[in-house]
Image (cartoon, rainbow, N blue to C red):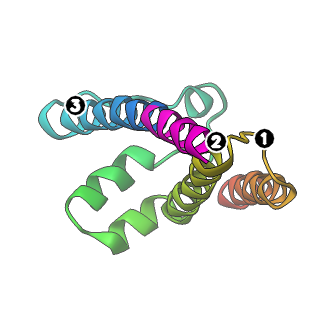
Amino acid sequence: EMRRDVAVCARGKKVAIGAVIILCAVAAGVAVLLWTPFRIPCPFYELTGMQCPFCGGTRMTLSLLQFDFMAAFSYNPYLFMAIPALLLFAGAWVGRYIRTGRSRLAVWQKVFLIALIAAGIVFTILRNL
């Protein structure tokens, strides 16, 4: 039991370090969006003239930071719903890793990711009709 607790604690520390790094990167990205005129053009749109599943993501993020959820949804409804779903998915995956040490995806997780990708493909096709 003691060895298991030590292993869980060690995995928890690894996850915490990773989470801090990710949060710092997100905070830096938000700072760039809020305090600079810098915007990232979409290479897919530039090459094809069609919107990719992520087009509108910057405007969506800026709207979310202003708590304008209707505008955020209008800029990219797919990302608006996919990001919270992915965060819940990641939380479940990380929790399982910390508890058990298993990092392989369960069957339901693979199905979830495939469904999310399929929804993104359908969204991209429909938004470009």
The CA span between labels 3 and 2 is 26 Å
Determine which residue is flagged by label 3. 32
Which residue extends farthest left? 35
Q: Nearer the viewer, residue 19 or 31?
A: 19
Estimate the x, y position of residue 127 in percent, counting from the top left. Answer: 65, 58
Q: Residue at x 60, y 58 (%)?
A: 92
Q: Give the range drawn in magenta.
A: 1-13
Name the N-terminal-most of marks 3 and 2: 3
Estimate the x, y position of residue 17 in percent, counting from the top left. Answer: 39, 30
Give the crowd class for mark 1: few <14, some 14-19, many >=20 residues within 10 Å: few
Give the crowd class for mark 2: few <14, some 14-19, many >=20 residues within 10 Å: some
The CA span between labels 1 and 3 is 34 Å
Q: Which amino acid does label 3 sit on?
A: Val
Q: Which residue is drawn at 77% across and 60% down?
A: 112
Q: Is residue 14 left or right of residue 23?
A: right
Asked if residue 51 can be seen in this view, the reply is no
Asked if residue 73 can be seen in this view, the reply is yes
Q: Which of marks 1 and 3 is in front?
A: 1
Quadrant of residue 60 within the rendered picture: bottom left
> Which disc is residue 40 wearing?
none
Estimate the x, y position of residue 7 in percent, counting from the top left. Answer: 57, 36
Name the N-terminal-most of marks 1 and 3: 3
Determine which residue is flagged by label 1. 104
> Which disc is residue 50 wearing?
2
Does 63 lie within the magenta span?
no
Secondary structure mostly seen in the magenta stretch: helix
Badge 1 element: loop
Q: Which of 8 and 25 is in front in this view?
A: 8
